[in-house]
Amino acid sequence: MKQHAKFARKTVTAAAAVSVILGIFSANAALAQDGLFGRLFDNDRNTKGERYVPTVWVDPDGCEHWAMDDGFEGYMSPHVNRQGIPVCHRQNVCGVMNTDQYFATNSYKLSAGGRQNLANFFQSANSRAYIIAGHTDSRASDEYNMRLSYNRANAVAAVASAVGAKVIDVRGYGERMPKAANNSAAGMSANRRVEIICIR
Amino acid sequence: MTFMKTISFLAIAGLLSACEGGGGRVKTDKTQDYGFRSHHLSTMTAGIWVDPNGCDHWIIDDGVEGYMSERLDPYGKPVCSDAAPPNTVIGPFQGTSTIGDLL
């Protein structure tokens, strides 16, 4: 009789322990979508992909980043389009020079008036640093346009440096980053430009 | 009888912990921080961390979570602006938190 009681008690203990453990496990399985330890028990869902919907954090430049808070971990990555171009709410291009007003056709020599305008711009723009990017329209060869746009950007950068502005990069994109379609005179004119990007 | 009560209590507690998710709040919304000072992630303030190549990254210490993301120019290239020497951080990256960061 005593032994029976002992056995029964043991069985009850074991059953209770199992029910407690099962309770915790099933709890976690049910809540596995996000619980701290849930994912350990949730192999099914992983194969389908777990729902991780980010929010948008906007950096001081005005550009978007994907952000997620998982409880204890935080994740962040820049929001770029499929071409790798950041998605931004405002432009950090603080000066666009239409090159027609600064350079003769096919030339990268700044006019005296253009040089003075640029010097004034860099003295008053009040940015910590600048990136200079040259562009052309689509006439002439790609190779020629790459070289011309780079030479023009360098001419602008030289003026910046001369008045003490910090230039951190100079680039020529040629005709590869058009701002407008090249099928009209107005479009081509808009594409002939040097962009000054202000880094604050 | 007391023994059975204890067992039942434990079993019920185990099941109830299910409802609580064990670790507290069930986190389905990744866009919020549910810490001591709950806030939406869009309100975080960043500093700049300069990597060993001299390029800028936005850095945020949001209490328990840390965030970092590249600073990119409009063409998607890294911004390497000499904001500070490499391997240093500047700006209000720890936000306005009143919780001391012991980590």
Image: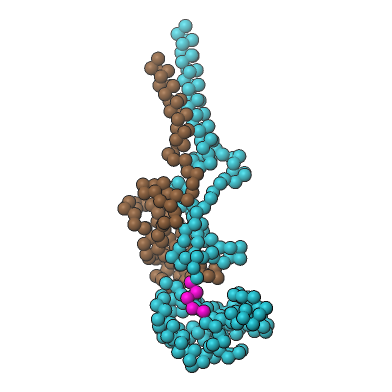
Chain colours: A cyan, B brown
What are the residue bounds of the magenta stretch? A92-96
- Answer left or right for B100 relative to B30: left
Q: In what quadrant of the picture does the C terminus of chain A appear?
A: bottom left
Which residue is located at x 53 percent, y 35 percent? A30
Question: Residue most toward the top?
Answer: A1
Which residue is located at x 43 percent, y 60 percent? B59
Would you place residue B48 above or below residue A145 in this image? above
Q: Is residue B64 visible?
A: no
Would you place residue A33 above or below residue B6 in this image? below
Q: In this view of the protein, which residue sits in the foreground, A16 or A65?
A: A65
Would you place residue B83 above or below residue A51 in this image? below
Which residue is located at x 49 percent, y 83 percent? A157
Can you give x and y, in whole percent of width and height, for residue A29 in the image? 54, 35
Whether the magenta-drawn stretch holds residue A95 is answered as yes
Can you give x and y, in whole percent of width and height, for residue B97 in the image? 34, 54
Q: Locate residue A193: give its quadrant.
A: bottom right
Whether the magenta-drawn stretch holds residue A109 is answered as no
Which residue is located at x 49 percent, y 68 percent? A90
Q: In this view of the protein, which residue sits in the foreground, A158 or A7?
A: A158
